Structure formats: structure tokens, C-alpha cells
Amino acid sequence: MQIVVLGMHRSGTSMVTGLLARMGCWIGTEAERTPVRADNLRGDQERRDVWQLNEDLLASLGASWWRAAPFDLGDIAFEPRRELERRARAIVRLLDAHRPWVIKDPRLCLCFPVWRAALETPVCVLVHRRPGEVAQSLRTRNGLDLAAGVALWELHVRAALRHSRGLPRVLASHGQLVADPIAATAALYSELLRLGVSGLRAPSAADIAAWVEPALYRARIDTRLEDELLNARQRALRDALADGSALTDADPGPAPSRDAPLDSDRPDRCPDPDHPRWMSPS
């Protein structure tokens, strides 16, 4: 089975992917994965080739994960898109020798249509975290304004919901995993089995406890303050993720809905920790 983890940056996608690895999903060799960074000592659980393809796709549109508007995959010319899809198929062929496997990169929220064309039996795990906490974490890591962080959260989440529509998919809550890692992991495992993913094993409580350390997740925000930060559509999206109705909504709608600086004209104020300087071979 082919598992794709979709979720905004700073939402727990690395944590979930690590749990999937402990269920038996192949990520890749250490040499194939991106190196550990100072802001994520556990590692991103990402493949270099997946990251690079997504970076190249965004760059072809003059975009990046934090400079993503306007963003339209339809603007990619036919030949460059065909080459990106060829690269995606080549990566998938490598991974298919190790089913079940998992790929993860928050950029997949925006880039998934190119990958979807290369996949045969994908199952999507949509990881979500409270937008105020995402924005707080982005402000600490990247110097982004809270409003910009929320707008980026909305953009990525709506894109992930839209691009994965029609596929088997399951939600994974960062908050639930941190609050009760064993129960939340068991629920994710059961849901993946229900969706037909084979070759998985239930991780032990010790494995889960060793991987999920709530003390590592320091960004917190009061619900009242978060409500003041979000507009009505953003609050509705947050709540739909929390109660699961986001998977049944007919259309996640366009994004963003807030006038926020998705195009940073101050790169010195938004240092990108995912810039290639971080990704040099170790």
C-alpha cells in the first residue's frame, strides 16, 4: 500500500510518519532521508528525492512553501509537468519494492496532484493541528507574523483536502496524539486496517512512548486568543477537522480567506529552514 502523509508544516507530520514507520511502513534508508535539523532533532522523516521534486515544482512557479500565493499547478507548462510526473513515477517505482511505504513532506499539500497521477493505491493520512499553535511555532522558527502563519495553515489544509478528495483517507490529530499517544496511535492503526492497508503491525506501547514526547511540543495557545486570531471560515475549518466532518464536506473551498502576507517581501524576516543549505548531504 502507498501511504501519503499530508499536513501543514509544524503540524506533527514528522511524528505521525515516525509512528507509521513503527507500524512497518518503509521510508527509506538513512542516506535517502533528509538530515536531522536543529529545529527537529527527531528528523523530518522525509526522503530527499521527494523533497527535491516538490521544491523544484514550487520553484517552477516562483513559489515556496511560505511564498505560495498566487499558486496554480495549471500554470506549469506541459513539458515541465510531464517531466515532474516522470520523476514522481520513478520515485514511486523505487518505493513500491518496499510496500507498505509512506512519504511525507508538507509541500505535498500543494504538490499532490503531480504525485497522485503516479500512484496506484494511495491512502492519505491528513495530519492537523490547531492553527494558532501552528502559527506560534512558525513565528518562533521562521519569524512569521501570526496572521501569515494562519493564512499558510489554511492554504495548505484546504489544498490537502481538495487534492485528496475521492481517495481513502483518515485524519490524525496532533493534539490527540500528544495527549494520549497510545490510544490515538491505536485508533490510527485500526482506521488504516479498515481502509485496507495491509502489512502493518501494531507498535508496542514502549515504541510509541519512546517516539512521542509531549515535552517536545511547546507551542500552545489559549482557545479564546485563537478564536480572535481566526476569521469565521478559518474557525469553521478548524472545527471541521476536529469533528471529522472535513472529510465529508463536498468542497473545502478556496483559500486563503484572510488578507495575510502569503508573499513575503522580507526574506530576512522569514528565514527558510528548508532551504537547500539545510539539505546538503551529511
Image (cartoon, grey):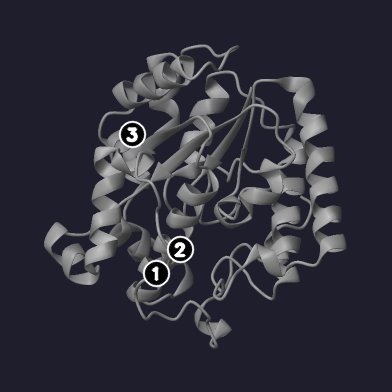
Q: Nearer the viewer, mark 2 or mark 3?
A: 2
Residue at mark 2: 155
Secondary structure under badge 1?
helix
Q: Nearer the viewer, mark 1 or mark 3?
A: 1
Pointer 2 local density, CA inside 10 Å: few below 14, some 14–19, many at least 20: many
Q: CA distance from mark 1 to mark 2?
A: 6 Å
Which quadrant would residue 53 be assigned to in this image?
bottom right
Q: Are marks 2 and 3 in contact (CB under 8 Å)?
A: no
Residue 280, image x and y in percent?
77, 58
Residue 184 appearing in the image: yes
Which residue sits at x=72%, y=64%? 276
Residue 8, image x and y in percent?
47, 54
Residue at mark 3: 177
At label 1, the amino acid type is Ala
Q: Are marks 1 and 2 in contact (CB under 8 Å)?
A: yes
Residue at mark 1: 151
At label 2, the amino acid type is Leu
Q: CA distance from mark 2 to mark 3?
A: 23 Å
| Residue 248 to residue 183: above or below | below
